[in-house]
Amino acid sequence: MSAILECKELTKSFGHIKAVDNVSIKINRGGIVGLLGPNASGKTTFIKICNDLLTPTSGEVLIDGKKPGVETKKIVSYLPEETYLNECMRVSDIIRYFEDFYQDFNKDKAYDMIGRLKLNAQDRLKTMSKGTKEKVQLILVMSREAQLYLLDEPIGGVDPAARDYILDTIITNYNEEAAILLSTHLISDIEKILDQIIFIKEGQIVMDKLVDEVREESNKSVDSLFREVFKC
Amino acid sequence: MTWDLDSDRPIYTQLVEQIKLKICSGVYKPGARLPSVRDLAQEVAVNPNTMQRALAKLEEEGLLYTHRTSGKYVTEEEGMIKQVKDKLAREQVQAFLDRMLNLGFSRKELLSVITKMMEEVK
Amino acid sequence: MLSKLLKYEFKATARVFIYMYISLLLFSLINRFVNPFDILNKTTSFNLAALLSVVTITTYFIVLVGVMIVTLVMLIQRFYKNLLGNEGYLMFTLPVKPWMHIVSKLVTAVVWTILSMLTAICSILIFSGATTEVIAALSDITDGIKGIFGPAGLIILPVSGIITMSEGILMVYAAIALGHLFNKHRILASFGMYFLLSVISDIFMMFLGFVYFTTLGSDFFVLMQREEFYLSAGQANMLLLSLAMVSVTFGTAYFLLTNYILRKRLNLE
């Protein structure tokens, strides 16, 4: 197993606030990793750095041994928290767009998932509900045969049935050559699909372990442990 | 098919237990082909890696075997299944006995309660 | 990759612009039938028809100018919204170098601006009915150009016009990028930055002008003071080309600045 993502002493400051503070993590291929922490703990900042949307203040991130840039963007599939698609576009337009720019995009998979959701590919995004838009974004991201999936709060702000759909999609698209990092603060829903958990608090890593180890050692669910560690 | 998984305990251990139960109770019949790792993981909503590990453990214990390209199968050795079933039963009964004896029941009292209840169940 | 970006850039912006230009042309066509110029030519007193004609002509020119302004505003907004708004999350995670984003936006901006000017000219022709006077006026203009710059001027002038236009657009992009560096009130900051950049470039131009006229072009200065100032076509073209070079320099500086900010100082909300 080789590391698809590795970061060493990564720090990102905004003024004198350290959003990401001396973070060193390793994620291996085939892993489904949860980056867990409360709001504003640095999860989104970290993920943005991996996507070359922010420049580190010090330290480095290597994806498949390379610094974030054009080469890594080809193998990283990113789902941000926001709706980042042009709402005037139709679903079929967006699929064509992704197909055009990403060599690893699997159009058939995308249409299959759209079909199973009973969505019309000719619909424009702006006619859809927020939940449906989020599902469409997820489908696009998971239809790429990427080597690293970075999902930022994929289940926040979405109803429980949609959450199940999202988790189901993640499991179905699982591939041993790739890794998935998802960040969230809603833990009980997703802990069963994680193999590794990383707790982040105020930009610092407070725990980085395999999930079943955590359960065995502490006799608790990750959710309970989280509540303990992050008690206000 | 219901799977009852607790987040408090290692999922891997629970998967091993529950699949074992399903084999013993006949949900997965001897010689039957199991769904693929991915499909099973999806059904249960767990990490495919964890499912893979659980299945590997069961294979180690002899309850499952892998057939080259067509996937995992339940063992046809009914004797082995019966063994496992017996072991499970003994574990359950032992746990029960321990609890009851702790509560202060004598063996005679226990036996009479059990006999009466089993007649009612018929 | 760049060609793909250009394709989608045009696709995304085409609809609005084409509707606008076709509407303008139709509007001028309709106005042509109203024929206000004719009415005005024929009236002797100030009656309703005359009033309506004046109103029509005024409205027409307001709409014309409006279209040019709207074109400019839309192109600026496109850069801001698509790269620095939520869509930026998509754009900057495409496996494409940031400079290609700037170039694709610049090229589309220049093309639409040129098209808007051409549409404006066509629309004026339609509105005024392409009478002999109008055509004569147009050929006077082209003759004038040839007079100063020689026949080459008919090519050099538009080309340097495009260069200056590109520089102007790049300056706007640089201002937007600089405004992005602020944490709050980014749009306001962009306006401020634009003002700042204009002031800096004006000062620089004045300085350049001063240097030029006191050294290489000192004879120009002397000549200009005299009434009979006359430039040969070659000299006029040289002047134009030098100005174009300055434009290219500024444009490149704005481009590099914008590129740097997008690469190293991006901070999407």
Image: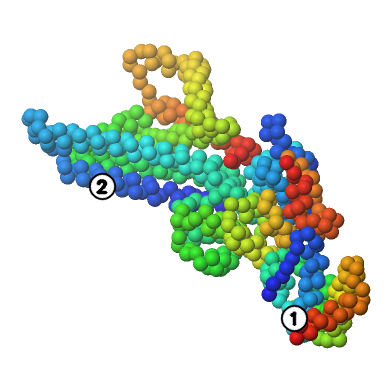
Quadrant position of residue A196: bottom right
For mark 2, give the secondary structure.
helix
Decide if residue C29 is on the left or right side of residue C2.
left
Quadrant position of residue A100: bottom right
Pick whichever, A152 or C125, lies toward us. A152
Residue at x-position 64% and y-position 38% = C264
| Residue highlighted by disc 2 | C26
Chain to which mark 2 belongs: C
Amino acid bearing label 2: Leu
Pick whichever, A138 or C121, lies toward us. A138
Residue at x-position 66% and y-position 66% = A172
Question: Residue A43 appears at what percent x and percent y?
Answer: 69, 46
Whether residue C212 is visible, yes or no, is no
| Residue highlighted by disc 1 | B28
Whether residue A39 is visible, yes or no, is yes
Q: Does the residue at mark 1 contact the one at mark 2 (Cβ under 8 Å)?
A: no
Question: Residue C189 appears at what percent x and percent y?
Answer: 53, 29
Residue at x-position 88% and y-position 76% = B110
| Number of numbered discs overlaid on the protein picture | 2
Quadrant position of residue A168: bottom right
Rendered-image quadrant of the C terminus of chain C: top right
For mark 1, give the secondary structure.
loop
